[in-house]
């Protein structure tokens, strides 16, 4: 009797472990399919600067947005 219980328990654990998971590792919660459009990154300020040697430069930063993920500016490094 004990052997039958072990076999049934093993089969149930194996079948539970082999079931296909509906979970996704993606943070995209949209059901529209994969996100294939890259984000748009815009540099703030002029596209080029001329500085004298040892002159201070302050980076004005950039912004980023994505059609599915929205505003990504805080994720820029």
Image: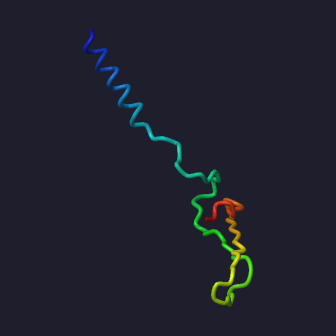
Q: Is residue 37 left or right of residue 12?
A: right
Residue farthest toward the front in the current orientation of the protein: 54
The percent coordinates of residue 68 (x first, y second) are 67, 60
Total numbered circles = 0
The residue shown at (69%, 66%) is: 65
Q: Nearer the viewer, residue 72 or 36?
A: 72
Q: Is residue 44 left or right of residue 17?
A: right
Residue farthest toward the top in the current orientation of the protein: 1
The residue shown at (29%, 18%) is: 6
Q: Nearer the viewer, residue 26 or 61?
A: 61
The percent coordinates of residue 27 (x first, y second) are 59, 51
The residue shown at (58%, 66%) is: 36
Q: For residue 50, which quarter of the picture? A: bottom right
Q: Quadrant of the image for the C terminus?
A: bottom right
Colour mode? rainbow
Picture layout, residue 29 above or below residue 59: above
Q: Nearer the viewer, residue 44 or 67?
A: 44
Q: Is residue 58 left or right of residue 26?
A: right
Picture layout, residue 30 above or below residue 56: above
Q: Nearer the viewer, residue 3 or 75?
A: 75
The percent coordinates of residue 49 (x first, y second) are 69, 87
Q: Quadrant of the image for the N terminus?
A: top left
Picture layout, residue 21 above or below residue 48: above
The percent coordinates of residue 38 (x first, y second) are 60, 69
The residue shown at (38%, 25%) is: 12
Q: For residue 37, which quarter of the picture? A: bottom right
Residue farthest toward the left in the current orientation of the protein: 3
């Amino acid at each position: 009797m004990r052997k039958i219980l072990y076999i049934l328990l093993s089969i149930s654990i194996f079948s539970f472990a082999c079931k296909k998971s509906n979970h996704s590792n993606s943070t995209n919660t949209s059901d529209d399919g994969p996100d294939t459009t890259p984000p748009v990154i815009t540099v703030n300020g002029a596209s080029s600067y001329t500085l004298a040697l040892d002159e201070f430069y302050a980076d004005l930063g950039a912004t980023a947005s994505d059609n599915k993920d929205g505003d990504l500016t805080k994720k820029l490094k």
